[in-house]
């Protein structure tokens, strides 16, 4: 795949500024826990490719489920939900720092901004500063969720996308799921994948794309979502080239 068109110019991306949403589980070892360095390296390589070869502004929102899931902890142990969510926010910072390291080893300038202030290791989230970093060609990783309990990192992705004027959210899936299906394809072999689906249909059919708050926010703000297998090599670029990859929600 060439990095330039026949006339020597960069390929024109479908969207020029995106938020890439990564779950913590996508970064995990096969056990579902910890960090898989090979996955981090692959994702960093693909992010660098679209940033440097296509000129796409890339912001990343990371989850923390490979270290901690606040809702599950609160449900199973009786832990205070807000406290459990704060622990989860710290887990997302761990993933953000790991991804930053992988990106910088690949030669890409990167900043981590966190909604839970940790001045020794990351910048506080400041909208205008984040936009300026993107304009300078840096990748910005948003960690710490929204800084508030009871909100998922899906909602963080929707909120940050609106704040930085991103044109789309790329919602990365894993474990072989490559889009939005009529049912869970792991449980129902007759399930079929949607190429495109509306926000309203996602909500009405109870499809597990993002949480309902995030979907509603994207609908209200006209932010399209592409749900795709982020661990299939080349998929990030393929989405931005406009190829039929995953499911478009809009």
Image: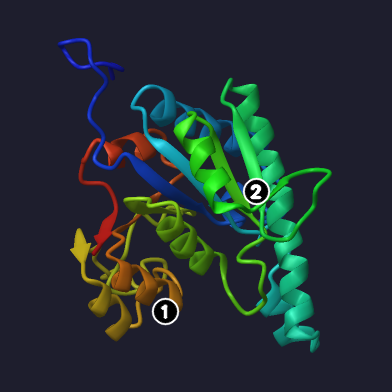
Q: Residue at x 80, y 48 (%)?
A: 119
Q: Is residue 71 found left or right of 224 in the rendered image? A: right
Q: Position of residue 246 (x, y in %)?
A: 29, 52
For disc 1, the marked residue is 212
**Residue lying farthest to the left in this orientation:** 7
Q: Nearer the viewer, mark 2 or mark 1?
A: 2
Q: Going 49% across and 43% down the picture, which residue do you hit? A: 131
Q: Secondary structure at mark 1?
A: helix
For residue 163, side relative to residue 243 (left or right): right
Residue 42 placed where, x, y %? 53, 32
- Residue 244, percent across and down? 20, 46
Which residue is pictured at 39% across the width and 46% down the height?
18
Residue at the disc numbered 2: 113
The dot on residue 119 is none
Asked if residue 199 can be seen in this view, the reply is yes
Residue most extreme to the front: 128
Q: Nearer the viewer, residue 146 or 129?
A: 129
Quadrant in the rendering for residue 120: top right
Distance CA(mark 2)–CA(mark 1): 25 Å
x and y percentages locating residue 127 in the rendered image: 54, 52
For residue 234, above or below residue 190: above
């Amino acid at each position: 795949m060439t990095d330039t068109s026949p006339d020597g110019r960069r390929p024109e991306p479908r969207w020029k500024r995106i938020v890439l949403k990564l779950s913590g589980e996508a970064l995990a070892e096969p056990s579902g826990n910890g960090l898989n360095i090979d996955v981090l390296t692959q994702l960093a390589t693909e992010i660098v490719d679209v940033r440097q070869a296509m000129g796409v502004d890339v912001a990343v929102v990371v989850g923390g489920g490979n270290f901690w899931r606040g809702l599950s902890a609160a449900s199973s142990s009786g832990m205070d939900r807000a406290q459990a969510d704060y622990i989860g926010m710290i887990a997302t910072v761990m993933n953000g720092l790991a991804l930053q390291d992988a990106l910088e080893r690949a030669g890409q300038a990167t900043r981590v901004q966190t909604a839970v202030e940790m001045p020794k290791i990351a910048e506080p989230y400041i909208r205008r500063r984040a936009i300026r970093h993107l304009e300078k060609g840096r990748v910005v990783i948003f960690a710490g969720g929204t800084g508030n309990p009871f909100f998922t990192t899906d909602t963080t992705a929707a909120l940050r996308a609106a704040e930085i004027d991103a044109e789309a959210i790329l919602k990365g899936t894993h474990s072989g799921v490559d889009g939005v299906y009529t049912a869970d394809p792991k449980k129902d072999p007759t399930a079929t994948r949607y190429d495109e689906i509306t926000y309203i249909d996602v909500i009405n059919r109870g499809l597990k794309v993002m949480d309902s708050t995030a979907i509603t926010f994207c609908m209200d703000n006209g932010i399209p979502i592409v749900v795709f297998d982020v661990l299939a090599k080349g998929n990030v670029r393929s989405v931005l080239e406009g190829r039929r990859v995953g499911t478009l929600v809009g």
